[in-house]
Image (tube, rainbow, N blue to C red):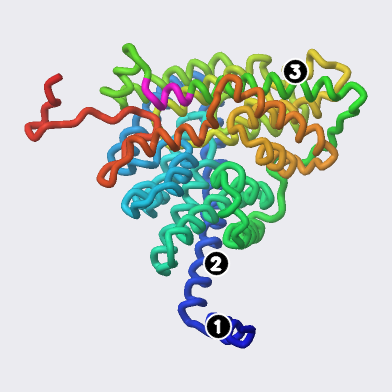
C-alpha cells in the first residue's frame, strides 16, 4: 500500500499538469497582491487629489459629488453590472452558486478591471467608500478566472480558489495576513470543512509577500502603544462593546433595508431613476461634508490615523456624520466597500466615548470603539479584533479587543438578526439569474418592451 501511495505521489509531482496548475495558482496570488497594491496607491492618490480640490473651495463638492456619483452609477449599470457595492456579498454568493454562468457574472475579469477605476472615480468624487471590500471581489475574480484556464477539477476546487482569492485580497489590502485567513474562515466560508484547505494559506502568503515586496513592511494605521488597566478598564470594554454593537447593528439594518427596496417616493426614485438618485445622493453627501468640515469624504483612513496615532481632534459629530455619509454612498449604487469607513466611524465614536471615561486612556478607548463598531457591522468578532490588532500593531490590547468585539457582535444581533454580508449575499442570490445580474443594492430597472416603452402596469 505504501509503495502504491509513493508511486502515485511521484507521478503527481512529475506531472506537467500538476505543475501547470500550481504555477497558475501562484501567478494568480501574485496578481492579487499586485492589484491590491495598485488599488491602494490609486485610492491614496484619489483621496489626496480630492482634498486638494476642497482646499481650493469647500463648496466644489456640491457640483463634483452629484456629477461624479451619477457618472459612476451610469457606467456601472451600463457596462459593469454586478460590480455595485462592496464586492464581498457577490463573492459570498458566488461560493453558493452551482452554475458557472452565474459565478462568471460576478467574478469575471471584466468586472475586476472595471471595479478599480470606478471605485477610484467614486473616491475622486468624495464618496465615503473603501477599497478593501472591492479588493476581495477582485482577488476572487482573478483566482476564479485563472482556475478556469488551468481547468482545476471539481466544484469544491473552484470554490476553494474563490475563497483563496478573497482572503488574499484582504491580506494584501491591509497588510494583515492573519486577518486574511480568519476572514476567509469566519466571514466568507462559515464552515470549517473548506477553510482548513492549504489553498487559502498559500494564496495569502504569496499575495502578502507580493504586497511586502512592492510597498515594504508597514502597519495600516501606524503604531500605537495604548494599553488598558483592567482595574477600571473593564467598564470601557463594556461601554464600547455595547455602544459599538448597537450602532453597528443599526448601520447594517439600514443597508439591508435599502437592499430589499423601500416604499414611497424614495423607493420609486431608486427603481425608476437610478442615475438621478445617485446624483441626489452625491448632493446629500456634499452637504454632510460641509457640516463635518470636509472630514467625511473618502475612505476615512487619514482621519482614523490622526485619531489613533496622533490624537488629533476631529468634530464631535464626526462619527455620526461619517456613518451617514457611508450609508448615502453605499445606497447610491456605486462600487465601493465599507471596511475602511467603518473603522473610521468606530474611531470617531471611540473618541466620543473617551470624553465620558476620563479614567481610561483615550487611545485605548478609541481602538476599542473601532473594533466594537466594526464587529457590530460585520458580526464577525474574531475577524474584527485580529484585523484591528494587526493594523495597529498593538498586542497589549489583545484581550480587551477580544472582549469588546465579542460583546459588540452579540449586541448587534439584537438589532440586526442576520450578518450584513450574508443578508446582502442572500438577497443577491434571490434576484440573480443566468442571463442577467441585477444590482446588489438597487431594485431591478423596469423592463423595456420591443418598442422601447415600459410595460403597462
- State which region is magenta: 255-261
Q: Position of residue 295 (x, y in %)?
A: 60, 23
Q: Is residue 75 visible?
A: no
Q: Nearer the viewer, mark 1 or mark 3?
A: 1
- Extreme-right residue of the structure: 231
Near-viewer residue (377 or 40)? 377
Q: Main secondary structure of the magenta part?
A: helix
How many angstroms separate mark 1 from mark 3 (CA)?
Answer: 62 Å
Q: Earlier in the sequence, mark 2 or mark 1?
A: 1
Q: Nearer the viewer, mark 2 or mark 1?
A: 1
Q: Is residue 399 left or right of residue 266?
A: right
What residue did someone put label 2 on?
A: 26
Above or below, 161 against 323 in this view is below
Q: Earlier in the sequence, mark 1 or mark 3?
A: 1
Q: Is residue 67 left or right of residue 329?
A: left
Above or below, 195 against 16 in this view is above
Q: Residues within 10 Å of mark 2 (few under 14, many from 20)?
A: some
How many angstroms separate mark 2 from mark 1 (CA)?
Answer: 23 Å
Q: Is residue 435 left or right of residue 452?
A: right
Near-viewer residue (444 or 313)? 444
What residue did someone put label 1 on?
A: 8
Near-viewer residue (390 or 405)? 405
Q: Residues within 10 Å of mark 3 (few under 14, many from 20)?
A: many
Kindly check if marks 2 and 1 are in contact, taking CB atoms under 8 A apart as contact: no
Kindly check if marks 2 and 3 are in contact, taking CB atoms under 8 A apart as contact: no
- Say what secondary structure mark 2 lies in: helix
Quarter of the rendering containing residue 407: top right
Q: Residues within 10 Å of mark 1 (few under 14, many from 20)?
A: few
Amino acid at each position: 500500500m505504501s509503495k502504491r501511495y509513493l508511486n502515485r505521489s511521484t507521478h503527481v509531482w512529475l506531472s506537467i499538469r500538476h505543475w501547470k496548475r500550481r504555477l497558475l495558482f501562484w501567478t494568480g496570488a501574485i496578481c492579487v497582491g499586485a492589484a491590491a497594491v495598485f488599488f491602494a496607491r490609486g485610492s491614496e492618490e484619489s483621496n489626496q487629489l480630492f482634498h486638494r480640490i476642497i482646499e481650493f473651495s469647500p463648496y466644489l463638492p456640491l457640483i463634483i459629488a452629484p456629477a461624479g456619483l451619477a457618472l459612476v452609477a451610469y457606467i456601472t449599470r451600463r457596462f459593469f453590472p454586478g460590480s455595485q457595492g462592496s464586492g464581498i456579498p457577490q463573492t459570498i454568493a458566488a461560493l453558493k452558486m452551482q452554475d458557472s454562468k452565474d459565478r462568471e457574472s460576478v467574478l469575471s475579469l471584466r468586472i475586476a478591471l472595471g471595479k478599480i477605476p470606478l471605485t477610484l472615480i467614486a473616491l475622486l468624487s468624495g464618496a465615503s467608500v473603501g477599497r478593501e471590500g472591492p479588493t476581495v471581489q477582485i482577488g476572487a475574480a482573478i483566482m476564479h478566472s485563472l482556475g478556469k484556464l488551468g481547468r482545476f477539477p471539481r466544484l469544491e476546487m473552484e470554490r476553494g480558489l474563490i475563497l483563496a482569492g478573497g482572503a488574499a485580497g484582504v491580506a494584501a489590502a491591509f497588510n494583515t495576513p492573519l486577518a486574511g485567513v480568519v476572514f476567509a474562515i469566519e466571514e466568507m466560508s462559515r464552515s470549517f470543512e473548506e477553510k482548513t484547505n492549504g489553498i487559502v494559506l498559500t494564496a495569502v502568503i504569496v499575495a502578502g509577500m507580493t504586497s511586502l515586496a512592492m510597498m515594504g513592511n508597514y502597519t495600516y494605521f501606524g503604531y500605537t502603544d495604548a494599553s488598558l488597566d483592567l482595574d477600571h478598564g473593564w467598564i470601557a470594554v463594556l461601554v464600547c462593546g455595547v455602544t459599538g454593537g448597537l450602532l453597528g447593528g443599526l448601520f447594517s439594518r439600514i443597508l439591508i433595508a435599502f437592499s430589499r427596496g423601500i416604499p414611497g417616493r424614495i423607493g420609486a426614485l431608486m427603481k425608476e431613476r437610478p442615475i438621478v438618485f445617485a446624483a441626489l445622493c452625491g448632493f446629500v453627501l456634499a452637504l454632510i461634508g460641509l457640516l463635518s468640515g470636509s472630514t467625511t469624504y473618502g475612505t476615512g483612513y487619514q482621519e482614523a490615523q490622526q485619531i489613533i496615532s496622533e490624537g488629533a481632534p476631529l468634530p464631535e459629530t464626526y462619527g455620526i456624520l461619517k456613518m451617514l455619509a457611508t450609508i448615502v454612498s453605499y445606497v447610491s449604487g456605486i462600487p465601493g466597500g465599507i471596511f475602511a469607513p467603518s473603522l473610521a466611524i468606530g474611531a470617531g465614536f471611540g473618541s466620543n466615548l473617551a470624553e465620558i471615561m476620563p479614567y481610561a486612556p483615550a487611545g485605548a478607548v478609541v481602538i476599542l470603539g473601532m473594533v466594537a463598531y466594526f464587529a457590530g457591522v460585520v458580526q464577525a468578532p474574531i475577524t474584527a479584533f485580529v484585523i484591528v490588532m494587526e493594523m495597529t500593531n498593538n498586542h497589549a490590547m489583545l484581550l480587551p479587543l477580544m472582549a469588546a468585539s465579542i460583546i459588540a457582535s452579540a449586541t448587534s444581533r439584537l438589532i440586526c438578526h442576520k450578518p450584513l454580508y450574508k443578508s446582502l449575499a442572500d438577497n443577491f442570490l434571490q434576484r440573480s439569474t443566468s442571463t442577467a445580474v441585477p444590482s446588489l443594492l438597487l431594485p431591478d430597472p423596469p423592463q423595456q418592451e420591443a418598442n422601447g416603452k415600459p410595460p403597462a402596469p
